[in-house]
Image (spheres, grey):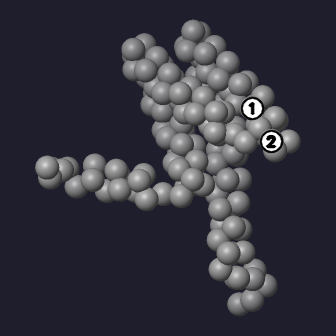
Amino acid sequence: MAINNPYKAYQNNSVTTASPSELTLMLYNGCLKFIHIAKKAIEDQNIELKNTNIQKAQAIIQELMVTLNMDIELSQNMVALYDYMNRRLMEANIHNDAAILDEIDGLIVEFRDTWKQMIQLNRQQKHGIQGDQA
């Protein structure tokens, strides 16, 4: 069966061929997308759209939580931060609070950007690229 939508085919292929670290980056970006849609929905007083997208953002955060390796000490701190974000998203949903969405957006952007840097450093180390060589 052929896929009629080339964008959908590309999207499916990019997920199935992504490394675990790239999938995590995709999760962060997806969470940000859903937070932005929810914030706009609050502004437009579209409660159903807000609710749906906050729940999608929460599902991503829950997925990030369950994929943590709890044998690593840093994961203990990460699970606490993810739990905090999840609770704050719940509050934003209940109170239609765009300021809370801004707070969580900022945290997710920091996590995503740090994760992106980690991926780049890993690639540089893997391929023997030195930062001081030009």
Pick out the residue farthest to the front.
71
Residue carrying label 1: 79
The x and y percentages for residue 81 are: 75, 31
Pick out the residue farthest to the right.
73
Q: Quadrant of residue 72?
A: top right
Pick out the residue farthest to the top.
94
Residue carrying label 2: 71
Q: Circle 2: is it few (<14), some (14-19), or many (20+) Cα within 10 Å? A: few
Answer above or below: position of 87 versus 119: above
From the image, state whether disc 2 or disc 1 is nearer to you: 2
The x and y percentages for residue 25 are: 57, 50
Pick out the residue farthest to the bottom.
134
Q: Quadrant of residue 85?
A: top right
Q: Which one is in front, 96 or 130?
A: 130
Q: Quadrant of residue 98?
A: top right
Regarding residue 1, the answer to whether it shows in the image is: yes
52 horizontally vs 76: left or right: left
* Amino acid marked by disc 1: Val
Q: Of the numbered discs in the image, which one, if any, rests on residue 53?
A: none
The x and y percentages for residue 42 are: 48, 19
* Amino acid marked by disc 2: Asp
Q: Circle 1: is it few (<14), some (14-19), or many (20+) Cα within 10 Å? A: many
Mark 2 → mark 1, Cα distance in angstroms: 12 Å
Answer above or below: position of 7 versus 91: below
Q: Residue at x 28, y 49 (%)?
A: 8
105 horizontally vs 12: left or right: right
Q: Secondary structure at mark 1?
A: helix
Q: Residue at x 70, y 60 (%)?
A: 118
Nearer the N terminus, badge 2 or badge 1? 2
Q: Residue at x 64, y 33 (%)?
A: 66
Q: Residue at x 70, y 82 (%)?
A: 129
The x and y percentages for residue 108 are: 65, 39
